[in-house]
Amino acid sequence: MTAPRRPPTAKSPYADSKVPTAKAKAPLSEIDRWYDRMPWRRCKASVLTCNPICQRLLENGEQCHNAARIVHHLISPHVARSFFFDWRILVALCPEHHETTEGENLTAPHRYAITNGLLGATADPNAIIWRLQQGLLPQ
Ligand SMILES: [Zn+2]
């Protein structure tokens, strides 16, 4: 007696490959998911609207001339999530000047131009970095 015949089935071309798939990714943390939500998109759009030019100051003290596209947290949201939407700790950067560090590297911080907020408000990222270096939170 032979096994019953079965119809041929399609096999995924990736079934035996080492190509990573979406399933192989680590699950996103709660903080990571905030980046996909509307409150952050609005916050980011507001920061970029108020600060359309990259805020990084170059070696010669001149501000970068590139268009800002990325909003960088000076304090990693993974360290202090209560500052996630605080515009004072956000700086608008071009892709070239955005580093993927978690927050600002306080041992070798960069210098930034003043951050413009809504209704003429301003914040000095360099003063905030100085406070963070002293172990203080922004006022
Ligand atoms: Zn730049």
Image: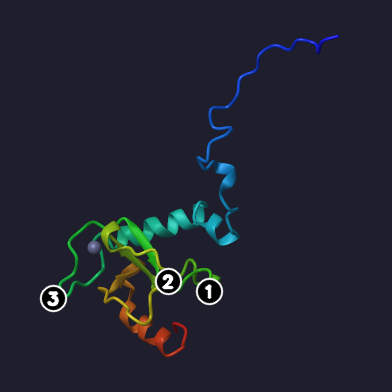
Label 1 SS:
loop
List the single residue furthest toward the front: 1
Between discs 1 and 3, the one toward the N terminus: 3
> Do tag 1 and tag 3 residues touch (Cβ < 8 Å)?
no
Residue 106 position by quadrant: bottom left
Q: What is the x, y in percent for residue 78?
A: 53, 69
Q: Is residue 133 visible?
A: yes
Query: Is label 1's Cβ within 8 Å of ligand 1?
Result: no
Q: Is residue 124 visible?
A: no
Of the numbered discs in the image, which one, if any, rests on residue 103?
2
Amino acid at dot 3: Asn
Residue sitting at 38 percent across and 55 percent down?
Answer: 45
Work out whether residue 118 or residue 29 is closer to the camera in this orientation and state it. 29
Label 3 SS:
loop
The residue where tag 1 is placed is 79
Q: Is residue 24 left or right of residue 108?
A: right
The residue where tag 3 is placed is 60
Q: Residues within 10 Å of mark 1 (few under 14, many from 20)?
A: few
User: Is residue 107 placed above or below 49 in the rendered structure?
Assistant: below
Residue 11 position by quadrant: top right
Amino acid at dot 1: Val
Residue 71 position by quadrant: bottom left
**What is the distance, in whole Å, between disc 2 and disc 1 at their CAs?**
9 Å
**What is the distance, in whole Å, between disc 2 and disc 3 at their CAs?**
24 Å
Of the numbered discs in the image, which one, if any, rests on residue 56?
none
